[in-house]
Image (cartoon, helix red, strand yellow):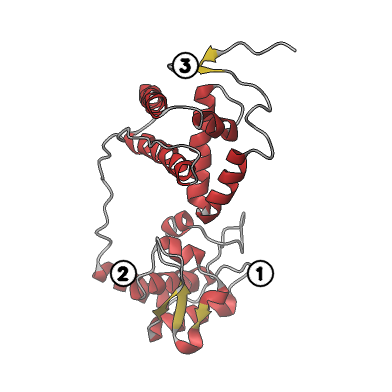
Amino acid sequence: MTTPKPHKASGSLVPVTPTPGGILDPKSRVKLTLERLFLDLNPKTLRAYQRSWDMVAEYLQLPSRVEAAGYVTKLSGGEANAMAMQWIAELKKDEKNKAATIAARLAALKGITKRLRIVGLITWTIEVKAPKVTQYKDTSGPGTEVVQKVVEELRQKTDEKSVRDLAIIHALYTTCLRRGELAALQISDLELVKNLIWITGKGRDDEESVTVPPKAKEALEAWLKIRPGDSKAVFVSLDPNCHGLALSANGIWRIK
């Protein structure tokens, strides 16, 4: 059997020998560790980590993200940080990669290596700094007068969309739920008899209750009576292409 010839990934200081099955063993400690350690990640963060590590694997010219993680465990701290710096430099060459995107990729790299270090597979940390991200997001909101005007207009209507949108506005502005929390809201999270909604707040593991004011309760109950589909989500799409399916946080943001 011929041994694959070592080669260098683009910009890499470290020779890479992609040996199918060498690191990627179904019983390998790396693979099992990754499976265990990512159980605590929410789906959105998990997808971001997977995408970033797919890019690491591509950069190292390895066949999978698990191979990439296994390869990284063989590096010294200096080699790992050199690899991270060179990878970030490669990402910066592409004008499509904004500072926020590169920072997110680096965060995913650090996130996985942190977990590998916690269980003793490595002893070092990635110390490369992320590029500075300029925040442009406007969080001032539309203002009370605008919200009140929209609420009054929706109250005069009885069509399906108006009833749903009125419930969404009440839930956002009278209970202070975030869009993500609203999108994740399930029928089982509602305890309207007690004027309560149960949510899992950002960065928390345990559920907490939020009091629902009378008008918000009234709007939610009106929506639940006509809510289409059999989705477990409280708020669903009314678009013909995905009618009755759960609304995403972006879907709520795009409502007009």
| Quadrant into which the N terminus falls | top right
* Viewer-side label of 1, 3: 3
Residue marked by disc 2: 147
Q: Circle 1 is placed at which residue position? A: 230
What residue appears at the point 49 percent right and 71 percent down from the top-left corner? 164
Seen at 47% across and 16% down, the residue is: 10
What's the distance in space between the residues labelled 1 and 3, CA to CA?
Answer: 50 Å
Reading the image, the residue beneath label 3 is 10
Disc 3 secondary structure class:
loop
- Report the amino acid beneath label 2: Val
Farthest-out residue, right: 1
Q: Is residue 182 above or below residue 135?
A: below
Measured as percent of width and height from the top left, residue 74 is found at: 51, 28
Residue 16 appears left or right of 152: right
Q: Closer to the N terminus: mark 2 or mark 3?
A: 3
The amino acid pointed to by label 1 is Asp
- Label 3 Cα crowd, 10 Å radius (few <14 / some 14-19 / many 20+): few
Q: Nearer the viewer, residue 105 or 149?
A: 105
